Image (cartoon, grey):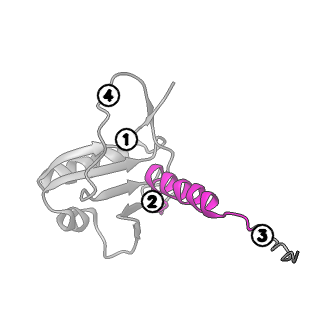
Amino acid sequence: MQLRPRRTRRTTENVVPLINVVFLLLVFFMLTGTLAPPSPLEVELPRAEGPFLDTEPDPDTPVLTLSASGVLALAGDPLTGPALSRRDLVEALGAGAVALRADARTPARILLPLLDDLEQAGVAQIDLVIERGH
């Protein structure tokens, strides 16, 4: 009787479940993460408590950042230079809505003239960005 040598079965590790887990983690972090650019100015947002509307601002709304020292940034770009006036900035924004990220330590003597300029330029809606406090 002639016996054939038994073939040894190669055992390979199945990597398909590992690929599935990595793919699911990738999709999870892509969906839950925010891809917002860092703020050009260091701003500590004011805290507020109470019932507020939980709405996200429109992505097309320009974001105006105001530091405590009065430095302005529009859409992530710091606005500096002697030729730039607030009136020119407001005209560049045009009418519509603006999201204002003002530092909590900004004095009223800096914030109020900016709000007046925005109103005089015809900005229809100014959304003040806050941080919910507890």
Q: Amino acid at mark 4?
A: Phe
- Residue that appears at 82% across and 71% down: 8
Residue 116 image position (x, y, % from top left): 21, 48
Say few, some or many: other residues with alpha carbon within 10 Å of mark 4 (under 14 / 14 to 19 / 20 or more).
Answer: few
Please name which of the two marks, 4 or 2, marks the residue nearer to the observer: 2
- x 83%, y 77%: residue: 4
Name the side, left or right, on which 67 lies relative to 108: right
The answer to whether mark 4 and mark 2 are in CB contact below 8 A is no
N-terminal-most mark, 4 or 2? 2
Sequence order check, earlier mark of 3 and 4:
3
Per the model, the C-alpha gap separating discs 3 and 1 is: 79 Å
Label 2 is placed on what type of residue? Leu
Q: Which residue is mark 1?
A: 108
The mark lying in front, picked from 3 and 2, is: 3
Is residue 18 a member of the stretch shown in magenta? yes
Residue 52: assigned label = 4
Tell me which segment is drawn in magenta: 12-40
Determine whether the residue tagged by mark 4 lies in a helix, strand or loop: loop
